[in-house]
Image (tube, rainbow, N blue to C red):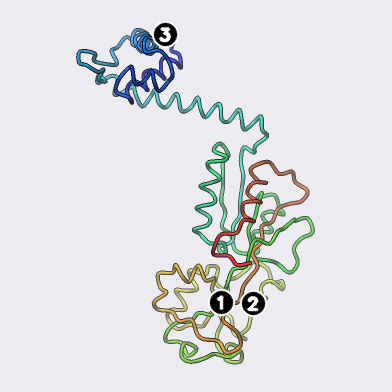
Amino acid sequence: MSLSMDQLESFVAAAEQGSFSGAARLLKKAQSAVSTHVANLETDLGIALFDRTGRNPVLTEAGARLLPEAKLILDRREHLIGVASSFEAHVEKRLVVAIDELYPESAVGELFAEFATRFPHVELELLFPIMEDVSRLVLDGKADVGVMWRQEQLPPELGFKTIGWVPLQLVCGKTHPLAHGRVDWEELKRHRQIMVTVRNEGTERHRLRVAAEVWWVESHWVILQILKHGVGWALIPAHIMASSQVAEDLAIPELEFDEGAHPVALEVVWHKQRPAGPAAKWLRRRFATRPPMLRL
């Protein structure tokens, strides 16, 4: 038995268009050629794919069963061609990207939808580690590209580019003492602060620390759940606060000393000594095109 791609293409096109003439127009072939391809396919398979007793061909039970199989074979052919083209263009087979939760989730979805269109054959792994782990993953070769908040001391092996500033808001529960009236700096120091933890004891761990008493929590989302019960205050990225399901139980106190915006720089990082393929380079450029939630 010998099946050709032309036969399968004609079969699928005729089934989808509802006629051999429609399939011929779609494939830009003569109708006689399409009819011949389908007839030869039926002969090779030993079954009728279409009932031709009416004005237009109608799929038989066997034809309906084999149609998705034929589509799958044609799809795999396109995949094979795409992979071969990517190989020729030296596009990476696999890419690992580590992203801090400071980067807006909605922007992640939009960006990687575009990535899927541009690099459909690249296997992608997205990691969402704790802040400082992003630089370690890139440094150790466990991630090709990272997005993270700015560190005061970035390893010299890493390249970086600032892609924007994430506004932080002072947040507490509505029952917390800070929720009522204007708040000054000394008041913040007197109440428990809840911060996102990092894995080492370096200066980055205490960079945004204000209060003497601190709780360390691994996620901003969990911090919000704690805050709603009146346990402490925290600096929360504005986009996380805006999309939180517990926002109605929280307060954003008015501050005496500024307008309430505490922006944190967000950077895309990569290892300077490791070669980057087209997909990684595109991601680095695309991350630099900041989403609307980020400020410059």
Which x, y percent locates residue 191? Answer: 55, 88
Labels 2 and 1 touching (C-beta < 8 A): yes
| Sequence-first tag of 2 and 3 | 3
Q: Could you classify mark 3 by the number of other residues whose Cα lies within 10 Å: few (under 14), some (14-19), or many (20 or more)?
A: few
Residue holding disc 1: 235
Q: Earlier in the sequence, mark 1 or mark 3?
A: 3
> Within the image, what quadrant is residue 62 found in?
top left
52 is higher (above) or lower (below) than 15:
above
Give the SS element for disc 2.
Answer: loop
Would residue 55 appear left or right of 11 to someone viewing this image? Answer: left
Q: In this view, does 81 lie to the left or right of 17?
A: right
Q: Looking at this view, name the residue that lies furthest to the left.
A: 54
Q: Name the spot of residue 282 as percent of width and height, x first.
A: 64, 46
Q: Nearer the viewer, residue 268 or 114?
A: 114
Label 2 belongs to which residue? 208
The residue that label 3 is drawn on is 1
CA separation, marks 1 and 3? Answer: 69 Å
Residue at the image position 58 percent from the left and 77 percent from the top:
261
Residue type at mark 2: give it.
Leu
Q: What is the x, y in percent for residue 277?
A: 69, 41
| Residue at (67% x, 76% y) in the render | 206
Q: What residue type is labelled 3?
A: Met
The residue carrying pointer 1 sits among few (fewer than 14), some (14 to 19) or many (20 or more) residues within 10 Å by Cα, namely many
Mark 3 lies on a secondary structure that is loop
- The picture places residue 204, in percent across and down from the top left corner, at 69, 71
What amino acid type should be assigned to the residue bearing mark 1?
Answer: Leu
- The CA span between labels 2 and 3 is 71 Å
Q: Quadrant of the C terminus?
A: bottom right
